[in-house]
Amino acid sequence: MNRFGRVNIILVVGIAVVLMLGYVIFMTRESVQTVGTKFMSALAKGDVNTLTELSALDGRDKEDLRKQWDFAINKAGKHYLFRWRIMGSKEADENSAAVRMQVIRNAMSSASYEENFQLPMVKEDGRWKVDVGNISRDMFPALPR
């Protein structure tokens, strides 16, 4: 009888550990919207390294992409102020998605208004990244191409 009780306890503990691991893995997986939010935060803060890490651009190596982001942030968009708000996201399939958002360009101007934009997303090596080449150039000056 004592042995039967131990088996049940071991079984219950084992199932609990498996469930906790599954929960941790599921909750730490970055969603499309989470990556879009991180990207836009990095864009607003001028964080070139995070923008480079979260960007996908066909045919560009990481160093070239970093240089292009450096130019966009520190030269072309140095004094560009904007506000943004994520409105939602939609996955087209397992490897592509879009994050919908509203952006107020030239935020210090009294004539500014909310405009709708999308961050196209692609999955690279199992991680969501922003497809920078397909972002509307109206959103931010001198986006990498």
Image (cartoon, rainbow, N blue to C red):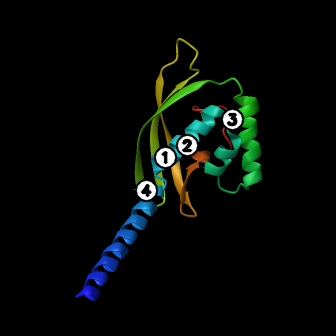
The residue carrying mark 3 is 142
Residue drawn where x is 31% and y is 82% of the image: 6
Q: Work out how far the residue at label 1 is from the one at label 4, CA to CA, in angstroms.
A: 12 Å
Of tags 1 and 3, which is closer to the observer?
A: 1
Taking the image as shown, residue 46 lies to the left or right of residue 95, namely right
Q: Nearer the viewer, residue 59 or 114?
A: 114
Q: Residues within 10 Å of mark 1 (few under 14, many from 20)?
A: some
The amino acid pointed to by label 3 is Ala
Q: Amino acid at mark 2?
A: Lys
Disc 3 and disc 4: Cα gap in Å?
35 Å
Total numbered labels:
4
Tell me where residue 25 appears, x and y as whole percent: 45, 63
**Vertical arrangement, residue 103 with respect to residue 32, above or below:** above
Residue at coordinates 72% horizontally, 27% vertically from top-left?
A: 78
What separation in Å lies between label 2 and label 4 (alpha carbons)? 16 Å
Gap in Å between the C-alphas at discs 1 and 3? 24 Å
Name which quarter of the figure residue 88 lies in. Answer: top left
Residue 136 location (% of width, % of height): 56, 38
Residue 83 is at least partly visible in this image = yes
State the separation of the CA atoms marked 1 and 2.
6 Å
Name which of mark 2 and mark 3 comes first in the sequence. 2
Give above or below for 142 relative to 105: below
Q: Residue type at mark 1: give it.
A: Thr
Mark 4 Cα-neighbour bin, 10 Å: few <14, some 14–19, many ≥20: few
Q: Could you tell me if the residues under marks 1 and 2 are in contact, i.e. CB atoms within 8 Å?
A: yes
Residue name at image x 32 percent, y 79 percent: 11
Q: Which residue lies under the disc numbered 1?
A: 34
Residue 27: mark in rendering = 4
Please name the residue that numbered disc 2 is placed on. Answer: 38
In primary-sequence order, the first of circles 1 and 3 is: 1
Could you say whether the residue bearing mark 2 is in a helix, strand or loop? helix
